[in-house]
Every structure is written in C-alpha cells, then in structure tokens.
Amino acid sequence: MRLGLSGHDRRPDDPILAIRRFGLQFSNPVGLAAGFDKNAEVPEAALRLGFGLTEFGTVTPRPQPGNPKPRIFRLPAQQAVINRLGFNNEGLDVAARRAEALQKRGDGIIGGNIGKNKDSTDAVADYVTGAARLSPLVDYLTVNVSSPNTPGLRALQGRAALTELLSAVQAARRAPVPILVKIAPDLTEDDLEDIIRAVIDTQVAGIIISNTTIERPAGLPPVLASEAGGLSGVPLFAPSTEMLRRAYRLAGDTIPLVGVGGIANADDAYAKIRAGASLVQLYTALVYQGPGLVRRIKAGLAARLRADGFARLEDAIGVDSR
C-alpha cells in the first residue's frame, strides 16, 4: 500500500481555500492522512504535491513489526482497502530524528500521529512519551485511540479513560502545539457525546473523524469481507460523514473537525466540509488514482464554493448540518 510521491505542484493555492484552525494557517484544507508516511520519511514530498497538511505516523515509543502478513487486502471494484497492519513503525527515536531534520516547508503544516505499543502495559505512558518527544518538532499532534488493529486501543475512547489520556498528553507537551484526537466511525450517540465532553473538558484543539471501520457493508466480496481489519476507501464515506455530521450538530463551531474517510473526488471533500469539517484528509484514494488527485480536488473544491456563492471556505463549513 505504498506509492511514490514524485512531482511538484508549483501553482499557488486558490485564496478561497485558505483557512485558519488550531492557531495554524492552512493554504488549503486537503491533507494526507496518517498511515501512508508511518516513519516521517516523506512529509516534505507530500506537501510539494499540493497538500495543505500532512500527518506522519502512527508512531509508537518502541519499534514494532505490526501484525503477521498478509495484512493488506485491496478491493478494486469498491475502491477500498482492508488493513490490519497494527502500527508497524520504526519507533519514536527514528521518527523524531527525521522530524528534526525537516527543512522549512513554506505554507505546509506537518502533524505527528502517536499511539501505544501493542504489548504496552501503560497506554498513557506511551502517549506521554510520544507527546513529549514530538511536540517541539511538529505543528500539531494527533492522539490515535481508534485503530481497530491494536488490542484494547478503542477502549481509550470512553469518557473517563479519554479525559485522563488527553489531560496527560496536554501536560506532557514540551511545546504548545495543538492536540487532536482521532476517533472511530463505529460509535453510538452516547459514545460520541462522551468523546465531545472529554475534548471540551481537556481543551483539546479538535477531533479527526474518522479512522477505519470494522463494519462490512453489503456488496464487498465475501472472501475479503471476512478478513479482520479496518475498512477504508469509498465504502467508508457514508458512515464517516454521518459521524462527522452528528459531531458537528453536538459541538457546533466550538470544536474544529477534520473529515476523513472515503474521499475520492472534490464532491466528497465538499460534502465533508458542508457536513462540518474544517479540514479533510485522504489516503486510500491515492492508491487507486495517484497523486494528481490532490490537484483535482483542490480545483474542484474552489469551483464548488464559488458556484454556491461562498466567498471563502469558512462560510461553507457545516451548512448541511445546522
């Protein structure tokens, strides 16, 4: 599930796409989601493709190989992927050294996504370690508590556990970068309300909605639908966007939201924004459409905003969820 990041989009972003969130200025709202660049190898290359933000990780304190192979399954007819990678990465020290070596990257925003080791007995300590090490090196940090491929991880989304975790991460930062939390699409209304309360209580900067799903919608090839792991790509669009819409209706404009899941074109990105997202991220669609997708989404998004009479991206956020 790797592809080369070659190319350079030298055209300046359309000013209608600019937005400020979490105290950061984004020249456009289209980001590369965590999972592609697990070890902070290519953040600058991602930004050169035209992304407004890129997020490396998930990084764990100690290196780990991830789950046994095979662990990635493509579903081309559905433009989807099932993965059970299990936070395979080279560890915090390697990612931090690469982040330290990053050069000035212009308008682009670089985030770091942190998680726990599979065999860890103290999840909070793992996140604290990641936050302390990476906070001086990135523009924002994401706390990943929603991957379905690390046992016990999603239990950290409960209100008490999440409040404890986010409070500890906030306190562990060695630089005042914004903290976001990435959640699952497979949540009840009560679960979502608890997460929003925890975010408000801990003054976390925002929520990323969502990670992959453990659900298997109709129409998937049965032999692949039975594989364990998280489903991403086009089938994730509807449930993740509905979760985004619910979160926006609960939180309004008090908590900035990042929409992720199933974005394959400008219409999808625009729908996420109209549902309540200030920023969007994608990954799986790049596997099938290549890096030129970034430019196409930005151009289409700007055109749709103008066609609907919006003078700026900000004005379209949440209009379908109010």
Image (spheres, helix red, strand yellow):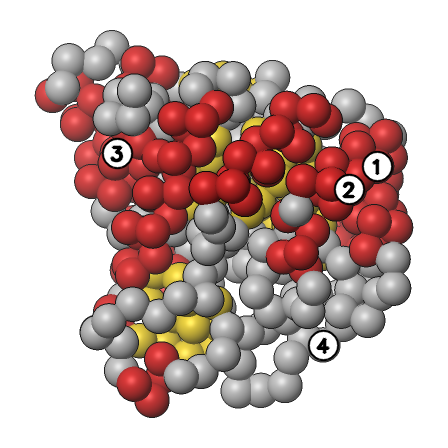
Element class at badge 1: helix
Q: Amino acid at mark 2?
A: Leu
Left or right: 198, with 161 as reference point:
left
Check residue 65 in the rendering and tell me which mark sits there, or answer none.
Answer: 4
Q: Element type at marker 2?
A: helix
Rounded to the nearest angstrom, the CA distance separating label 2 from label 3 is 32 Å
Location of residue 72 with respect to 18 vertically, above or below:
below
Q: CA distance from mark 1 to mark 2?
A: 5 Å
Q: Type of residue at label 3? A: Tyr
Tell me where residue 60 appears, x and y as whole percent. 76, 59
Q: In the shown orientation, is residue 104 left or right of residue 176? A: left
Place of residue 141 in the rendered image (x, y in percent of width and height, measured from the top left): 68, 38
Distance from the alpha carbon under mark 4 to that under mark 1: 27 Å
Residue identified by numbered label 2:
165
x and y, in percent, of residue 153 in the image: 68, 59
Q: Earlier in the sequence, mark 4 or mark 2?
A: 4
Please give the name of the residue rendered at 48% of the width and 50% of the height, measured from the top-left corner. Answer: 187
Q: According to the image, label 1 marks what residue?
A: 168
In front: label 4 or label 2? 2
Identify the residue shown where x is 80% and y is 39%. Answer: 164
Q: Earlier in the sequence, mark 1 or mark 3?
A: 1
Q: Amino acid at mark 1?
A: Ala
> Quick one: label 1, few (<14), some, or many (20+) residues within 10 Å?
some
Res 270 label: 3
